[in-house]
Amino acid sequence: MQLQNEIHRFTFAEYDVRGELVQLNDTYRDLCFGHDYPQPVVRLLGELLAITSLLTATLKFEGHINVQVQGNGPINFATVNGSHDQSLRGVARMRSELSGETLPEMVGEDALLIITLTPHKGERYQGMVKIEHDTLAHAVESYFAQSEQLPTRIWLHADPLNLKTGGLMLQAMPGTGKEDSGYEHTVALADTITADELHNLPVKDILHRLYHEDDIHLYPAQKVRFFCGCSRERTADALRSISREELRQILEEEGELTLTCDYCLTTYRYDAIDIESLDAHQQPEQPQ
């Protein structure tokens, strides 16, 4: 199987339009591995993975982006986090069995799409929009119309059986509109893309099929990977925030203390010796 874990940026010589195209398989597989999600949830996570990668590629800073769907339906929330270097992780949580497979049926009424930008330097920004459409792509387009005021179209296709996902995003350049940017022309051609093409064709072939009469500049690809970032030291930091008496009580009742990462399902185990030695491994505070 051809490995497709890359995102590609492209621009048009004649039009004030920029594009991003992402194809993922191993990254998608790693994100879902071991979770035993129902197929509709796997599909939703695949779409979230693709859109988060697309949005991460637009970041103008070093930091993180979080894309979350939150509602009162069977899915409590589903989220994917991405960093500026295209390291992604995600998880979904369910409160009940699914009664349908459309986005509104899975996340319920009054669900929200929440996008959070967290730069390493600078202020955190969060925007949200009510989910009023049947697809995640339409929800993100509504977010851009409301928050960024940039004409934006998105195509997402996730295959939960073969664990392939991909996405295409077109945006009019800032300062231009739909009419004078060539945006409508590029969107009309992109509307013909199929899931099979997005999952299986090389990017150059996809762009040639869509825009063989246009002059396109394709930039070097960027690798995309699943990366959780959890560690034993991070779980130890979390335990240090809990009183020692409470930790000892858990040990008495359970025999050991275990913490399992929500994202990669790695389990960290602590016995009585580990708990008593937490302070010994804590970094000393720096003098003010």
Image (tube, grey):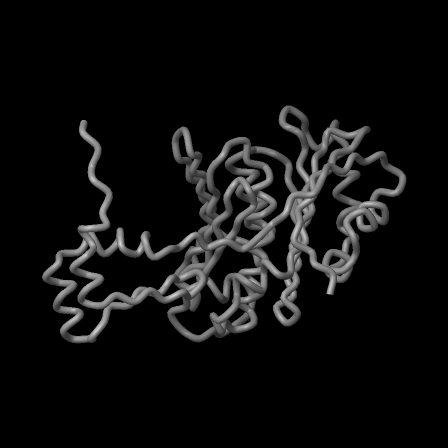
Residue 155 showing in the rendered view: no
Quadrant in the rendering for residue 72:
bottom left
Which residue extends farthest right?
213
Image quadrant in which the C terminus is located: top left
Is 258 above or below relative to 168?
Answer: below
Count of numbered tags: 0
Q: Is residue 32 visible?
A: yes
**In the image, farthest residue toward the top:** 175
Q: Which residue lies at the image location 52% right of the left edge and 51% below the top edge?
A: 88
Task: Please state the horizontal and vertical placement of residue 70, each as a whole percent of the image.
Answer: 42, 56
Q: State the residue at coordinates (77%, 49%).
A: 203
Residue 234 drawn at (x, y percent): 32, 52
Q: Nearer the viewer, residue 233 or 189?
A: 233
Find the residue positioned furthest to the left. 245
Left or right of residue 218: residue 230: left
Q: Residue at x 89, y 39 (%)?
A: 213
Q: Going 68% across and 42% down the picture, which residue do you hit?
A: 20
Q: From this view, report whether residue 2 is shown above or below residue 214.
A: below
Report x, y in % for residue 124. Answer: 39, 35
Q: Where residue 265 sits: x, y (%)?
A: 42, 66
* 113 or 133, nearer to the observer: 113
Of the pair 250 and 99, the residue shown nearer to us: 250
Q: Is residue 102 left or right of residue 17?
A: left
- Which quarter of the figure is the N terminus placed in? bottom right
